[in-house]
Image (cartoon, helix red, strand yellow):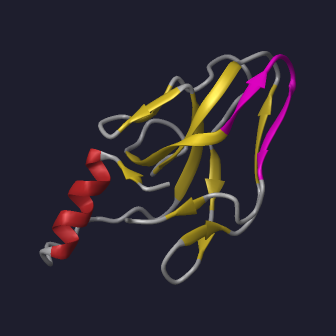
Amino acid sequence: MTDLTDHAKNLLSRALCARGPALPTAVWAALGTGGSDATGVTGEPAGTGYARQRANFTGTGQQRNSASLSFTFTAAAGTITHIGLFDAASGGNPLTWSTLSSPVTVAGPGTVTIAANALTVTAD
């Protein structure tokens, strides 16, 4: 994930100028059908049992999720094409977003899993 949202770009700009922004204390992964620098992930599934998942990362430069992320669905949610990070379990500020390497069609109840070390965050 190298696409920083406008919010994350502003955080980084303030940090580089020693203006000490309030950085997130936790991040949640989200799935959706689109994304942009202004909004992060868009089209999060609603009414399908879906919820954002708390994500923990490790690394010294490039960051990788340290555990798998499992998104559970109780109903069809269509085709999921994007993933992103937010600073809250719902609402909150978008931080980064990216297109999934392969779209996932959720045709009914089930789970979408992102394996440990499969989600990388870089600031290229």
Residue at 70% x, 69% y: name it: 66
State left or right for residue 25 relative to residue 63: left
Please state the horizontal and vertical placement of residue 70, each as a whole percent of the image. 78, 46
Tell me residue 8's x, y (percent): 31, 55
Magenta region, residue range: 102-114
Answer left or right for 89 relative to 108. Answer: left
Task: Pick whichever, 71 or 63, lies toward us.
Answer: 63
Quarter in which the C terminus is drawn = bottom left
Q: Main secondary structure of the magenta part?
A: strand
Which residue reaches farthest bottom?
Answer: 60
Q: Is the residue 58 above or below the residue 3 in the image?
A: below
Residue 119, image x, y percentages:
63, 58
Residue at x-position 49% and y-position 28% = 34
Relative to the observer, which residue lies in front, 115 or 95?
115
18 on left or right of 121: left
At 83% from the left edge and 36% from the top edge, which residue is drawn?
111
Q: Name the residue: 71% across, 66% down.
A: 117
Looking at the image, residue 91 sits to the left or right of residue 57; the answer is left
Name the image quarter holding residue 100.
top right
Q: Let me know if residue 104 is in the magenta part.
A: yes
Is 6 within the magenta?
no
- How many numbered marks appear? 0
Q: Where is residue 28 in the image (x, y as percent from the top left)?
A: 56, 50
